[in-house]
Amino acid sequence: MSTGNEALEVWIDQDLCTGDGICAQYAPEVFELDIDGLAYVKDSGDELLQDKGATTPVPLPLLKDVQASAVECPGECIHVRRVSDKTEVFGPDAE
């Protein structure tokens, strides 16, 4: 699927997170495991975003790593969507 140059954002459904840490291995600039053992997204300032459904922009240079995280995640909890219309392009709800 082509995303062109459209802005993308990513979020994690912690209810489904298995804590495997695959996402943090692929894209440590975007994902991090917290003390609770679950993965969260980080903002551009490296701050963990712990609010439910918190999103962070996907930096274009990291798109392939974030995509791989969504594909490889055993919990199928990583959602990547277009900012413009909230359509999921990678993750369990992508068409």
Image (spheres, rainbow, N blue to C red):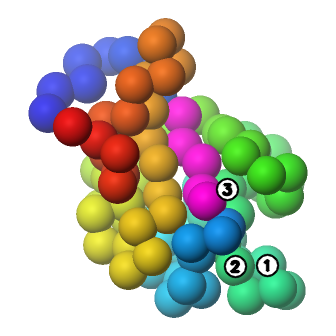
Left or right of 82 in this view: 44: right
Q: In which quarter of the image is the C terminus?
A: top left
Task: Please tell me whether mark 2 or mark 3 is closer to you in this view.
Answer: 2
Q: Is residue 84 above or below residue 65?
A: above
Q: Name the residue under label 3.
A: 41
Q: List x then y, in percent, for residue 57.
A: 59, 34
Q: Quadrant of residue 50?
A: bottom right
Label 2 – label 3 distance at C-alpha: 10 Å
Work out whether mark 1 precedes mark 3 in sequence or the reverse, and give the earlier one.
Answer: 1
Q: Indicate the amino acid at tag 1.
A: Asp
Other-residue count near label 1 (Cα within 10 Å), few / some / many at <14 / 14–19 / ≥20: few
Q: Is residue 15 above or below residue 83?
A: below
Q: List x then y, in percent, for residue 82.
A: 43, 24
Q: Which mark is residue 85?
A: none
Is residue 6 within the magenta segment? no
- Asked if the residues shown at circle 2 and circle 3 are in contact, with their CB atoms under 8 angstroms apart, the answer is no
- Asked if the residues shown at circle 2 and circle 1 are in contact, with their CB atoms under 8 angstroms apart, the answer is yes
Q: Indicate the amino acid at tag 2.
A: Leu
Residue 75 visible, this orientation: yes
Q: Name the residue under label 2.
A: 38
Residue 59 visible, this orientation: no
Label 2 – label 1 distance at C-alpha: 6 Å
Q: Is mark 2 on a helix, strand or loop?
A: loop
Other-residue count near label 3 (Cα within 10 Å), few / some / many at <14 / 14–19 / ≥20: many
Other-residue count near label 2 (Cα within 10 Å), few / some / many at <14 / 14–19 / ≥20: some
Q: Mark 1 points at which residue?
A: 34
What range of the chain is rendered magenta? 9-13
* Dominant secondary structure of the residues highlighted in magenta in the image: strand
